[in-house]
Amino acid sequence: MSRPGLPSAGIAERAAAPPGALSAVLTLGWRAALKIKHVPFQLFDVMVLPIMMTVLFTFLFGGALAGSTGAYLQFLLPGIVVQTVLFLTVYTGVGLNTDVQHGLFDRFRSLPIWQPAPVVGALLGDLARYSLAAMVVVVVGLLLGFRPEAGVGGVLLAVLLLMVFASAMSWLWIIVGFLVPTAESVMTTSFLVIFPLTFISNIFVDPATMPDWLQAVVAANPVTHLTNASRGLMHGGVALVDVAWVLGASAVLTALFAPVAMRLYYRER
């Protein structure tokens, strides 16, 4: 018989029960999403930089490349959404590298949680930031005159497809985050990949104006297919081959990089 005023054994056991895998992932995902609040500089890349890119490219190059800023905006904006989100995927590796350097992974190791939760939660929280950045670019585009012919549904499908590819790309930056010594090294290393990947594509111009050898490179770039699919979903008339290409590339990237990232994570632990 338990004495009055003392917790029963059942209550003590329930209080000591570790959180489930889903609870741990959501908690650490929320922590990743809150990084913008505690690191306001990242707000610049999430909101300010996409707005600057959209406005500058539209008004600087629109008349020269498409005859008018309005016509160029219809072509450019889906690509700017793609470029913005792909650049932000780098921060997944930066955040994990910072956590490792500050010893937070040692703290996570001591907690009775599902151990992959710090990596999976960080990826989940970053997907929320990618979605926010994509919506910021779309809203700015609407204010400037962008008119997606497929409506809200088309835009949401394009963003959803982009999230699938961005999550696959993030595994690569997680690997980089575990391998290099500092967050600055993650940024430098990743930009050596992300810059050619986004600029040697059809985001800004029609590849038909490029040399034949460069057209072949652009055609093999998964970002080109992602941009084609996004334009098709937003404006209507999407080619299913582009969607299939993006889903296939995402599956391959995840199959290649996710096991390596988790192996490095367990080695770090």
Image: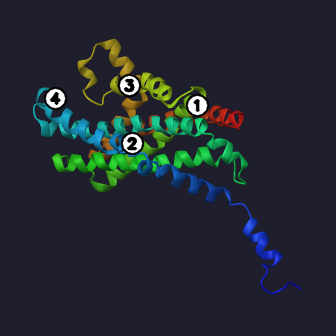
| Mark 1 neighbour class, 10 Å CA radius: few under 14, some 14 to 19, many 20 or more | many
Q: Residue furthest right?
A: 1
The tag on residue 42 is: 2
Q: Where is residue 43 drawn, in percent x and y?
A: 36, 45
Q: Point out the image quarter for the N terminus.
A: bottom right
Closer to us: 55 or 211: 55
Residue 45: image location, x then y, percent: 35, 40
Instruction: Decide if residue 60 is on the left or right side of residue 12.
Output: left
**Real-space CA distance between mark 4 and mark 1, rounded to the nearest whole angstrom:** 36 Å
Q: In this orientation, which residue lies closer to the viewer: 79 or 134?
A: 134
Whether tag 1 and tag 3 are in contact, CB under 8 A, the answer is no
Q: Is residue 175 above or below residue 116?
A: above
**Could you tell whether 86 is left or right of 142 in the image?**
right
Amino acid at dot 2 = Gln
Q: Name the secondary structure under disc 2.
A: helix
**Which residue lies at the image location 68% right of the left edge and 60% below the top edge?**
20
| Cα gap from disc 3 to disc 4, whole angstroms | 19 Å
* Amino acid type of the residue tagged 1 in the rendering: Ile
Within 10 Å of disc 4 (Cα), the crowding (few <14, some 14-19, many 20+) is some
Residue at image position (66%, 32%) is 264
User: What residue lies at 69% left-to-right and 51% top-to-bottom?
Assistant: 114
| Secondary element at image label 4 | helix
The reply to whether the C-beta atoms of the residues labelled 2 and 4 are less than 8 Å apart is no
Going from N to C along the chain, the mark reached first, 3 or 4, is 4
Q: CA distance from mark 1 to mark 3?
A: 18 Å
Q: Tell me: 256 left or right of 244.
A: right
Mark closest to the chain's N terminus, 4 or 1: 4
Residue that mark 3 sits on: 195
Q: Of the residues shown, which amino acid type is indicated by label 3?
A: Phe
Give the mark nearest the N terminus, 1 or 3: 1
Q: Which residue is mark 4?
A: 61
- CA gap, disc 2 and disc 4: 27 Å
